[in-house]
Amino acid sequence: MSTTSVPTAARHGIPPGARARRQTAHVPTSERDIARGVLITAALAYLFLSLGLPLFVVFHEAFKKGVGAYLTALRDPELLRALRLTLLVAGIAVPLNVTFGIAAAWAITKGKVRGRTLLIALADLPLAVSPVIAGLTFMLLFGMQGWFGPWLKAHDIQIAFTVSAVVLATIFVTLPFVARELIPLMEEQGVVEEEAAVTLGASGWQIFRRVTLPNIRWGLLYGVVLCNARAMGEFGAVSVVSGRIRGQTTTLPLHIEILYNEYDFTAAFAASSLLALLAVVTLAAKHLLERSHHVARARIIEEQHERES
Amino acid sequence: MSVALDRVSKRFGSFTALNEVSFDIEEGELVALVGPSGSGKSTLLRVIAGLERQDAGIVRIHGDDAAPLGPGDRRIGFVFQHYALFRHMTVFENVAFGLRVRPRRERPSGAEITRVVRDLLELVELGALGGRYPTELSGGQQQRVALARALAVQPRVLLLDEPFGALDARVRKQLRQWLRNLHDQVKVTTVLVTHDSEEACEVADRVAVMHEGRIAQIGTAKELAREPGTPFLGAFLESSPRKASGAPRPFGVAPGGTS
Amino acid sequence: MMQTVPAGATTRASRARSVLPGVRITLGFTLAYLTILVAIPLSTLFVRSARMGWSGFLSAATSPRAIAAYRLSIGSSVTAALVNGVFGLLVAWVLTRYRFTGRAIADALVDLPFALPTAVAGVALTTLYSQNGLMGALLAPHGIKVAYTPLGITVALTFIGLPFVVRSVQPVLETLPGEIEEAAATLGADRWQTFLRVTLPALMPALVAGVSLSFARAIGEYGSVVFISGNMPGLTEIAPLLIMSKLEQYDYGGATAIAVVMLLVSAVILVSAGMIQRRAARRAA
């Protein structure tokens, strides 16, 4: 046998280019065309019914009374204030969680710390907790009966039912997103490049910026996109801590709730359409990034295989 | 004639894997298909099995055109390089699988299945391991289970795709000999694909050397060693994994002729 | 930020620590962040529960209204998770195994429940299934009411749980070695037999993981459900809604008790699912 290793794609002696792009073999023992057609139709019908229709309804209802009514609703000052608050909250929560995500991933994957399972479990915890419960915990901390309640009152500081509480609750709920993307990614990439940089005399920050960051670009962006989508859309936790003070602590989702409960459907769905649009953009970005992400990870895995064989 | 190939061709996109391959395998023979990576030997095996469809040419198994038959209907047994055992089933259940999925009318009774499986496990010298799971076995043992599983359905042709490729050298040598003995006992037509010419010559009745989608030469091991058809074949037949250290063996670009 | 290692010295500490700089500071930051933002807030639940004393906790956690809420929450979450198990598997299969126009869009669409704010999903679903909504109008003549019933709650929970199953199964399905299915075919199994006996068992761990994640998400869901449920105590009040209710009445103790019960249920489900997964994965390792 030749001395060069045989890359996985050439398993049957077929050059990588000619082979199907997916790594799994095209199983020629596959379903009859009818069965395939039925399954595809069923799956697409289900997706349309369960996911497509609700999305459609948002825009359908928003424009039901015409484009004029839609635009008027969007120009409502309260809605704009809610939008601004949402953007502000996301603008604080996302960068903070990005910093956390990077720091945690660095410490865990490049630092080989003990207790990494505990750290990862803690970082994942907000995902396992209902948003209402998340909000509850912050009320237990900062509410009048809470731990810091009396102290805050004494110092005339108000946290519960203010924007600060909204920000804190949002940070909690969106905390895991960036970390969950970066930790496995940086784990896979290993420490060799960074160690090489150290031997060449680079400082920590330089190593991160010049060596690590380019490698984690797509994973990071992906995490940011998810984190942002969740931050802007958070409802349950914010519902609890904001006190729903109209015009002051109502984020866009809360504002939608108010409008809906007042039967102002056009306005409610007009506001919803903004968030739905954000969702669609998020999905598109996610899809595009995933491909680069996958390609990057696939390349890493293939390099590893070649090294081992 | 157990297996007859008549001008079989197969392309993958712009790459020609098989180029009008014709040859015959006798009943009860053990034929080895050797060649470097990319020569088409695995593809040929899979076409015989029905796991790939040829673009042109006819595959006949026991005289009948195999085209309308899928891999399950051709009465073939296939052994994969990486065993392809069903990891969630015990060794026993793996071997019994082919019998259990038979249509109701043709299915043997539970007791019958147990007997067949036990006998086969004895044959491959794994009698005591029926209750184990594949992941608990060594590579060599797993491959023997795969063999037993393939034999359980009483195939007319046994196809082995680089069966020892994933095993270490020592185990490979042992299993090679063991396969030859097994074949002498069971006497089923067998086609063995390997990149190891030493293995091919040791085990097979006849060796077919493949190169760039064609059969360059067929003959017994002795015949081939005496008269390699081309310098390429000579070099290839001399090479073996053990000797391949240092300078790479030149496979060269040789005009391979069909035999 | 550089971590200076004394030249020539190889103390136990420096051998155990990485050579890379910045680990200490990032670790410190990470620990502080997690403590302040995760550990402390979550611990308030248990401290507050302790304050209520055992009997206080029990009476709050097991009031008739609470029990009705648990039953509804668990029941609808289990149903939704199982429905997602079936259809999620179907969708994952079709997306992975077949090529067709619109595949990319369908694949991207699966994540909609992740990306869409729960409140938007909530109002959209309610409008869709209300009496004169697009679906509601279709179902009304058959006597099926969805909005403001437990069925509506289940529908909403099914919506938000789908991606968990699909995204759990997809990667496993993508990397399933084609050979085991080929082996089954050579042994005479038809496609259905191969699927039932070979493919599905191999997918089981991922499917179990996806279904349990779907359940865990469903049980705590608020935004998607609060609009469609109508929030009638004893009838359509799920646990998160009950907690919200208690909070609005400033009954922090009651809210906390129910929250702790919910967390325990989630923990039990996730841990047992993890065990099932590990056992199955061990065999497949």
Image: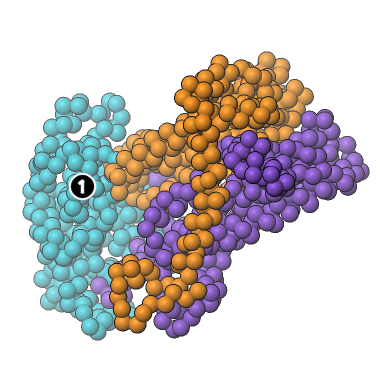
What count of labels does the image hold? 1
Residue at 52% across / 20% down in the picture? C59
Q: Relative to the observer, which residue lies in front, B123 or C25? A: C25
Label 1 sits on residue? B136
Tell me, yes or no, if residue C84 can be seen here. no
Say above or below: A257 vs B208.
above
Q: Relative to the observer, which residue lies in front, B218 or C264? A: C264
Q: Position of residue A27 (x, y in %)?
A: 41, 49
Q: Position of residue A142 (x, y in %)?
A: 64, 42
Q: Position of residue A271 (x, y in %)?
A: 79, 43
Give the residue type that dot 1 points to: Glu
Residue at 43% across / 58% down in the picture? A23
Q: Relative to the observer, which residue lies in front, C44 or B221? A: C44
Question: In this structure image, what is the colour of chain B?
Answer: cyan
Residue at 75% across / 22% down in the picture? C131
Residue at 69% across / 23% down in the picture? C230
Place residue A92 in its image quadrant. Answer: bottom right
Tell me, yes or no, if residue A177 can be seen here. yes
Question: In this structure image, what is the colour of chain C?
Answer: orange
Say above or below: A298 vs C66.
below
Left or right, B189 with respect to B82, comes to left
The secondary structure type at the circle numbered 1 is helix
Left or right, C95 with respect to B83, comes to right
Q: Position of residue A5 (x, y in %)?
A: 32, 71
- The chain coloured purple carries which letter? A
User: Circle 1: is it few (<14), some (14-19), or many (20+) Cα within 10 Å?
Assistant: some
Label 1 marks a residue whose chain is B
Say above or below: B176 vs C76.
below
